[in-house]
Image (tube, coloured by chain):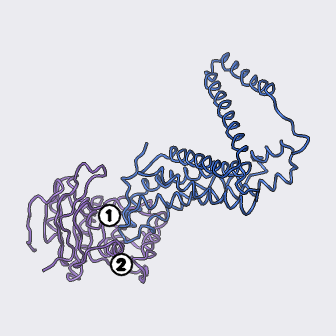
Amino acid sequence: MRSDLEAAAIGVRVASRERWLLRDVDFSVSFGERVGLSGPSGGGKSTLLRALVLLDPLESGSIRWRGNIVDELAIPTFRSEVTYVHQRPAFLEGTVEENLRLPFQLRAQSGRKYDAELAVRWLERLGRPPELLTQRADRLSGGEGQLVSLVRVLQLRPSLLLLDEPTSALDPETSGRVEEVLVGWVKDRPDERACVWVSHDADQVERVSTRRLLFANGQFASPVGEGAST
Amino acid sequence: MSAEYLSMGYGQILAATLLIIVNMGISLVLGLALERRLLVASARTVVQLSLLGFVLGWVYQHPQWYVLFPVAGLMTFVAGHAAIRRVRRTYPKALVTGTTAMAAGSWSITLIGLIVIVRPTPWYAPQYAIPLLGMILGNTLNGISLGIDRFGEELVNKRDRIETLLALGATRWEAAHEPMREALRTGMTPIINSMSVVGIVSIPGMMTGQLLAGVVPVEAVRYQMIIMFMIASGTALGTLLAVLLSYFRLFSNKHQLLVSQLTSR
């Protein structure tokens, strides 16, 4: 059976081209999966997630999404379906709500409209009040920023989330909520949703994932729990 | 030219030099250590302007297009080089980008100015073509330099924002829109400022020259307006092109921000 996102032999080099950050990496995810990715800092986990959505130039290899090679024209649409969530969320000037509205102005999101109720529902599920919408986005704490950036991406109804330490700035209780929400998000529609979750917290990886992988030195260290399902 | 125009001789230059020497004396007495720099700067003024005088004199005596065009090309190349040298973050082929934008922006406006507006005979008469091109180049240089500089700064400082937009499905054009707008605004600010205060705070150099040469004020004002508009359009066009070409260098057609292409100096 083919996987929904397939990376074949992808390679990324540093700008000076003298060193490989990723080399000949194969990776695939299918809908319904929750892949937990752990490994040492600087081992290339973020680089891998960025490479999967082509945020950095690939030196080799290719990415297939639902069976098709992702070509130049399709990249914005592809990224609206397979979305990388940055560890340090970035916002534009303005309120949280203005930031949540912003992606709907993009061509890749055309035909969709901002739904305030939906945004509030996601906020509440993450344990934050609706008043957060009127706050200035650049004044958010690191943790609240992470929550808002999750709401920003969830309201866009992606299919695959690439989460780069999404709870790194959160207290354990809120982290637990985020885990619950994201696990529930995949479980609700296992035939059209999946996530890859990068975390330093081994317990968290254990809790959230159906498949666990160790990534170090730009490669998968060993097929930990390959194919295992929980 | 009017009869009121006074020609300057070497004696008068010597008198003006005395002013500088007095200043160097003051610097020596007070230990300001400025005398050496003043001397070097004054020497450069003499040498560079004398050279300019010779070259212009020679070009005026040879009003042929095949004399004018290499001179204009050299001026453009030097301006392009100066524009890129002042940029804090450079990228591969930035010099080509800057010079191309410089040439396209200033030449097109100078050509229109000569052929459609000022209309000397022949249209490439060096007396008109060289000063016009020079003024437009000088200002376009600032626009391009500031524009590319700001664009690089925006991309580095707002990298997270730009990549967040790209990650959410923005095209490279959508993601670059704000940095480009900021870069253009920065590049255009000096000329817009000087257009806003011209005549109130400052009398432009070219107009001063015409007034000293005895041109009636109304006439000098008309010239100055035309020049101002030409300078502003040249700057706008050159800056726009420079930022646009930089955009194509720093955002790939795969909608990637190639921030690693930028190296600071």
Q: Nearer the viewer, residue B128 or A54?
A: B128
Quadrant for the C terminus of chain B in the image: top left
The residue at the far top in this view is: B29
Q: Residue at x 70, y 19 (%)?
A: B26
Residue A187 in percent (x, y) is at 20, 79
- The chain coloured blue is B
Instruction: Please state, as top left, top right, bottom left or bottom right, where the N terminus of chain B lies in the image.
Output: top right
- Residue B109 screen position, x and y as percent: 65, 59
**Amino acid at dot 1:** Leu
Could you tell me which chain the residue with mark 1 belongs to?
Answer: A
Is the C-beta separation of discs 2 and 1 under 8 Å? no
Tell me which chain appears purple.
Answer: A
- Given residues A177 and A106, the one toward you in this image is A106
Residue at the disc numbered 2: A121
Residue under the image location 36 percent in, 73 percent down: A76
Residue B84 image point, x, y percent = 51, 47
In the rendered image, residue B251, in percent from the top left (x then y), is placed at 40, 62
Q: What residue is at 42 percent from the left and 58 percent from the top? A: B249
Q: N-terminal of the two: label 2 or label 1?
A: 1
**For residue A101, side relative to residue A128 (left or right):** right
Q: Is residue B196 above or below residue A181?
A: above
Identify the residue position indicated by label 1 in the image: A55
Measure the C-alpha gap from mark 2 to mark 1.
30 Å
Label 2 residue SS: helix
Answer left or right for B109 relative to A35.
Answer: right
Q: Nearer the viewer, residue B257 or B227?
A: B227
* Crowding near the residue tagged with mark 1, few <14, some 14–19, many ≥20 C-alpha atoms within 10 Å: many
**Crowd around label 2: few <14 · some 14–19 · many ≥20 (10 Å):** some
To which chain does the residue with label 2 belong? A
